[in-house]
Amino acid sequence: MHKGLTTFRAFAFFAVFLFHVGELRIGYLGVQAFFVLSGFLLTPILLDMKSNLGTKDFFLHFYGRRALRIFPLYYFYLTLVALLSFAAISRLEFFNDAEVNSFLAQLPWSATFTYNFIQASIYAQETKLVSHFWSLAVEEQFYLVWPLAIFIVPQKHLKTFLILAAASGLVFRCLMAYISLNQLAPMLHPKTDVLIYLLTFTQIDAFVIGGFFALYVKGRSGLSVWFFILAVIVIGLMASWITGGNIPWASFGYPHFMKDAYKYIWGYTLMSLLFAYILVCVRDRQFLPAIFENPILHYLGKVSFGMYVYHFPMIWVIGLFPIEGVSKYILILTAFTATIAVSIASYELMEKRFLNLKEKYFSRDMQPVAQGVKA
């Protein structure tokens, strides 16, 4: 993988972290950036594997690689927090923390990567121990269907398929907005913008646009990226002003979950196009290569999965022990530093061991089956 694309993960995480500590209102779009990056990276990989592997090995190797990347850390975290939670409840007579109780109540959803479904319902419960895992559920659900789609669509029809699949994201968001606004499904989350944000099929165009740009778009210049960013901000601000008379400067025109000017319909597509173009220019070394290829940022990108998993509980833990007279920014910095430290330890002591097994057991560089050669 190009160094810059790994570094992009770090910046996406920084946005999410700042959003969760209340310092960047547009930071929720860091998750959108992760979705686009997933499609950007996986679609070309799947095409290569389709060319080099038979049907059985194609699916076995893809899901084997994904499992080694996601499952060890994910289930280690869930197991650890579950054990600590049960221990606290059983040993501390008066222990009744809402965060822990919500975690335990929703543990089956977390463990089965269906957490976004419960969060998109009227039974949603917020907890900093796993609430951020809705996005991991979306990604895993995408991984279930995307390899099959890439495998069965002929190469000559792939471009058309990607365009139609990207358009389906807009269609699904329109459909869910209609259902929500007309209260046709009372079991769903009452807030339309939240509901649309949490579902896999309403986010599908993020993944597809990432794949399309990876395959068919070339980077031009860093200046073109800045023009694109400026245009997206202007569009967002003007849409807010025209429809509501307000200008959300602090969120650069895209307030929490795109809730104004029906941005939850079109805003995600626009942002996905922007992130995908940034990725193309980063890959082609057209946009801030000195930053995106910085070794420290690159390493933080490598451990970003751990940072994403651990950051919200770290924010919660640090918040449990406020110190009188200590600035909230010191607490934020402490949570950030602790997140990085734990993530590095997790990566070096556990995750890396499983990642090293990917090429050993599930190589994606095997020779074509027709040649009768296997790695």
Image (cartoon, rainbow, N blue to C red):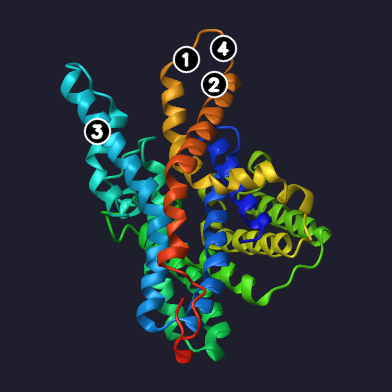
Which of the two discs, 2 and 4, labels the residue nearer the N terminus? 4
Q: Residue at x 83, y 58 (%)?
A: 223
Residue at 44 percent of width and 61 percent of height? 358
Whole-number angstrom distance, CA of label 2 to CA of label 4:
8 Å
Distance between mark 2 and mark 1 Cα atoms: 8 Å
In three-dimensional space, the C-alpha distance between marks 1 and 3, rounded to whole angstroms, equals: 25 Å
Rate crowding at label 1 as few (under 14), some (14 to 19) or many (20 or more) other CA atoms within 10 Å.
Answer: few
Please state which of residues 136 and 99 is positioned toward the viewer in this rendering.
136
Q: Earlier in the sequence, mark 3 or mark 2?
A: 3
- Looking at marks 3 and 4 on the same chain, the residue that comes earlier in the sequence is marked by 3
Residue placed under numbered mark 3 in the picture: 83
Q: What is the distance, in whole Å, between disc 3 and disc 4 at their CAs?
A: 32 Å
- At 74% across and 58% down in the image, what residue appears? 231
Mark 2–mark 1 CB contact (< 8 Å): yes
Q: Which mark is residue 166?
A: none
Q: Which residue is mark 1?
A: 322
Gap between marks 1 and 4 measured at Cα: 8 Å
Q: Is residue 350 above or below residue 160?
A: above
Instruction: Give whichever of 80, 374 is nearer the camera.
Output: 374
Which amino acid is tagged 2?
Leu
Q: Secondary structure at mark 1?
A: loop
Q: Nearer the viewer, residue 134 or 147?
A: 147
Where is 79 relative to 197, above or below? above
Residue at 60% in and 43% down:
300
* Residue 62 percent coordinates (x, y): 42, 69
Residue 326's tag is 4
Are the two marked residues, 2 and 4, in contact with CB atoms closer than 8 angstroms? Answer: yes
Q: Is residue 199 visible?
A: no
- Left or right placement of residue 142 versus residue 125 in this view: right
